[in-house]
Amino acid sequence: MAIKTQTTQLFIINPGQTPAVLEVGEVTDIKGIDAPISAVESTTLASDHRTYTPGIAEPATATFSVLFDPKDTAQATLHALRNAGTPLHWAVGFSDGAASPALVTDGDTFDNTAIARSFIYFDGFMTTFDFGAEINDVVSSSVGVQLTNRPSLVVSA
């Protein structure tokens, strides 16, 4: 059975002396969290058709949009982390639960054991953080994240 998008949340680990989970506020969409497997041609001269074998994963660029709020400290933190080129740990929490992701004991990665909500975890750095404004609309931002590894799906317990 499919799950609804309502109550889906996006989180990062805000690095620093005391890493902490930070929810990205006002998210309106999240797309492209993937690492497609490339195809390596394995055709021989004796073949009458091309053949392929799986190659390496090629982490994609994910995007998410937010309704921009200059007073939202999470959005300001994200913008500063993008300007610094800081790689981040990301988590998308789905609507089959409401818990925020926890940190492991050392505090710098997500703890994906005994969770009460399904998550997609991935690592990446922000490549873009643009702003847009149109007549009769709200200010929005689109953020691009270059994944640096394969995303992992952890299903709630």
Image (cartoon, rainbow, N blue to C red):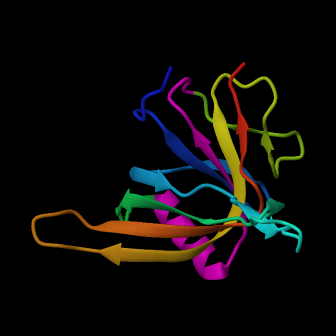
**Bounds of the magenta span?**
73-98
In depth, the one of 18 and 140 nearer the eye is 140
- Percent position (x, y) of residue 97? 56, 24
- Give the side of residue 13 with respect to residue 128, left or right: right
Residue at x 73% of width, y 66% of height: 58
Among the 4 quarters of the image, the one containing residue 60: bottom right
Q: Residue furthest left?
A: 136
In depth, the one of 35 and 98 nearer the eye is 35
In depth, the one of 80 and 130 nearer the eye is 130
Query: Magenta span has 102?
Result: no
Residue at x 71% of width, y 65% of height: 59
In depth, the one of 149 and 95 nearer the eye is 149
- Percent position (x, y) of residue 100? 62, 35
Q: Relative to residue 94, is residue 30 depicted above or below?
A: below
- Percent position (x, y) of residue 143? 48, 68
Residue at x 79% of width, y 62% of height: 51
Count of marks overlaid on the render: 0
The quadrant of the image that shows the C terminus is top right
- Give the side of residue 18 with respect to residue 61, left or right: right
- Percent position (x, y) of residue 129? 47, 74
Q: Relative to residue 42, is residue 105 depicted above or below?
A: above
Among the 4 quarters of the image, the one containing residue 88: bottom right
Query: Magenta span has 80?
Result: yes
Q: Relative to residue 3, is residue 111 depicted above or below?
A: below
Q: Relative to residue 1, is residue 38 depicted above or below?
A: below
Residue at x 82% of width, y 29% of height: 113
